[in-house]
Image: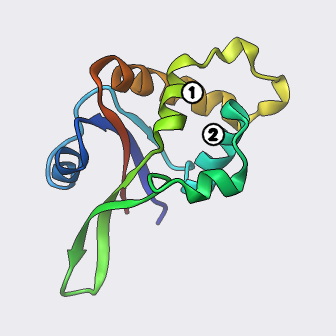
Amino acid sequence: MSLLYEFFTAEDDTAAAAMLTVACPPPVFRTEGLRSAALADLESLLTGRTEAEINADPRHGADVAELFDEDVGVAECGVLSVTDTLTRALAAADVATLSSDAGWQIGAVRGLAPVARHAVRNGHRMYCLWTE
């Protein structure tokens, strides 16, 4: 079974953690293929930040909350943070300026940019809810 990733915005980590038990408010971008490593690649492409800088950012894929199934002993879903740098870059991104070699990143920017613009416009942060 593959993981589903839902990117959304929230005022803060506490509000984002609440999405473990309720539906994410729009706008939401749903995908099966954007893990933290892919987000780091996307952030590097859009901002020029190095992998080391991105990985050192405390908001890069940081665990905000998890819903743990005690009976099975595994996490059912969780919320991860998205860096503020990537959020701002996505909000300002213009797909037309990306190289045609960007491939999957073009689709990712198209899906994530509306969520990022909403976050920036409302003073929110971006998050990713993953579920099995």
Instruction: Say if 90 sits above or below 10 in the image.
Output: above
Looking at the rendered structure, which numbered label has been put on residue 80?
Answer: none
In the image shown, does 79 or 71 lie closer to the viewer? 79
Label 2 crowd (10 A; few <14 / some 14-19 / many >=20):
many
Q: Position of residue 77 (x, y in %)?
A: 30, 63
Q: Earlier in the sequence, mark 2 or mark 1?
A: 2
Q: Position of residue 33 (x, y in %)?
A: 57, 49
Going by the numbered disc 1, the residue's amino acid type is Ala
| 23 relative to 132 in the view: left or right | left
Task: Please tell me which residue is depicted at 59% across the width and 28% down the height of the picture.
Answer: 109
In the image shown, does 84 or 10 lie closer to the viewer? 84
Q: Which residue is mark 2?
A: 43
Instruction: Say if 47 sits above or below 97 in the image.
Output: below
| 24 relative to 54 in the view: left or right | left
Q: Give the SS element for disc 1.
A: helix
Label 1 crowd (10 A; few <14 / some 14-19 / many >=20):
many
Could you tell me if the residues under marks 2 and 1 are in contact, i.e. CB atoms within 8 Å? yes
Label 2 to label 1: alpha-carbon separation: 8 Å
Looking at the rendered structure, which numbered label has been put on residue 89?
Answer: 1
Quadrant in the rendering for residue 35? bottom right
